Image: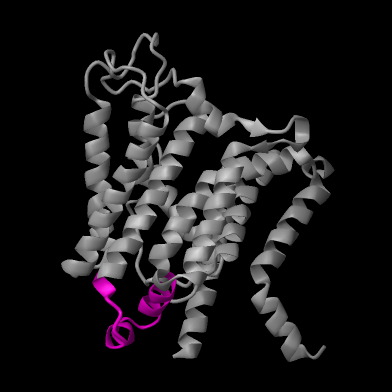
Amino acid sequence: MNTVKMKGLLSQNAIYIVLFVLIVGIAVYDPSFIAVNTLRDVLIQSSTRIIIALGMAFILITAGTDLSAGRIVGLSAVISASMLQVSDYPRRFFPDMPELNVIIPIALAVIIGLVCGMINGWVVAKLNVPPFIATLGTMVAVYGLNSLYFDMEPNVSQPIGGLRPDFTTIGSGFIGSGEFSIPYIVIIAIVVSVIVWVVFNKTKLGKNMYAIGGNIQAAKVSGINVSKNLIWIYAIAGALYGLAGVLEAARTGGATNNYGNMYELDAIAACVVGGVSTSGGIGTVPGVLVGVFIFTIINYGLTFIGVSPYWQLIIKGLIIVAAIAIDMRKYATKK
């Protein structure tokens, strides 16, 4: 194999090599890191982040960005948790509410996420507001709305707890037994990943998404209804954030209005490291998944071997800068 082919191979598989080296490096320091329980914990911690990052990938591929993702996650978590407390909990959010079918609050939370995303898309597509500014405004407004809801009597800003077992089982339950059990939350993340892969690669919306991100003017000329597609893309992303919020509440057994804080930055970082171009038009589901796993392993693995959280932040920051620098260099070369 000649040097050119070797460089091409390394370039195409760089993120997989980084993930492998990261795992091997931690395992060499502490061999107990290579265990089924460790893999299970990494998958559980990655599950909601994967769903958020996939939603973010929709936006980034259109050459946009979404700063409201984390706050939509928080709103959905609070909405679902507030309606799914056990009936005898002493600080019940809705004391007189009858016990609802678990599907109803979950669906409501996801729909609220979808509506928030649709508003983002409408502002970007119809009012021509840059995505950064549009979603920044939504981020602030959604947090304010969530805080008002969270501060309602009789809750008055107390952490929401006492969640029903049929809800928390979604986040903590599993199929099988012992070390080889598969958590429900991991299964949900896998199903969502497969669906998003199909949308990206096998649907008209996916093809239009890549076309808009690659060259929006050319997309318009080719007959693509850019405004309609953008609204639906942002709406789907919002629904994914809503689902992630529900799963986060179920996983942790509670919620506050600060849930989801800064999650959007982790999602953007995972997407960029996973090969989603900040210039639009490029991105894959496997790349996003690997990007999420890289950051989860940094957080979990380095904590596992006792590395300070501050060093973890430095490492994450350097990886993000390096990934964006590489992405911009590729974009400049193509131009």
Picture quadrant of residue 203: bottom left
Percent position of residue 258, x then y: 36, 35
Most extreme residue toward the left is: 127
Identify the residue shown where x is 65% and y is 77%.
Answer: 12
Tell me if 288 is positioned left or right of 249 in this view.
right
Residue 157, horizontal then vertical, whole percent: 29, 23
Q: Quadrant of residue 83?
A: top left
Q: Is residue 134 above or below residue 9?
A: above
Is residue 40 one of those drawn in magenta? no
Q: Is residue 93 above or below residue 179?
A: above
Q: Residue at x 68, y 84 (%)?
A: 8
| Residue at position x 51%, y 48% in the image | 49
Q: Residue 143: give x, y in percent of width and height.
A: 27, 41
The x and y percentages for residue 118 are 27, 56
* Residue 279 visible at all: no
- Viewer-closest of 134 and 194: 194
Image quarter (top left, top right, bottom left or bottom right) of the C terminus: bottom left
- Considering depth in this image, is 146 or 98 the residue closer to the camera? 98
Q: Which residues are magenta?
A: 206-227
Nearer the observer, 83 or 297: 83
- Quadrant showing the N terminus: bottom right
Task: Work out whether 99 lies above or below 319.
Answer: above
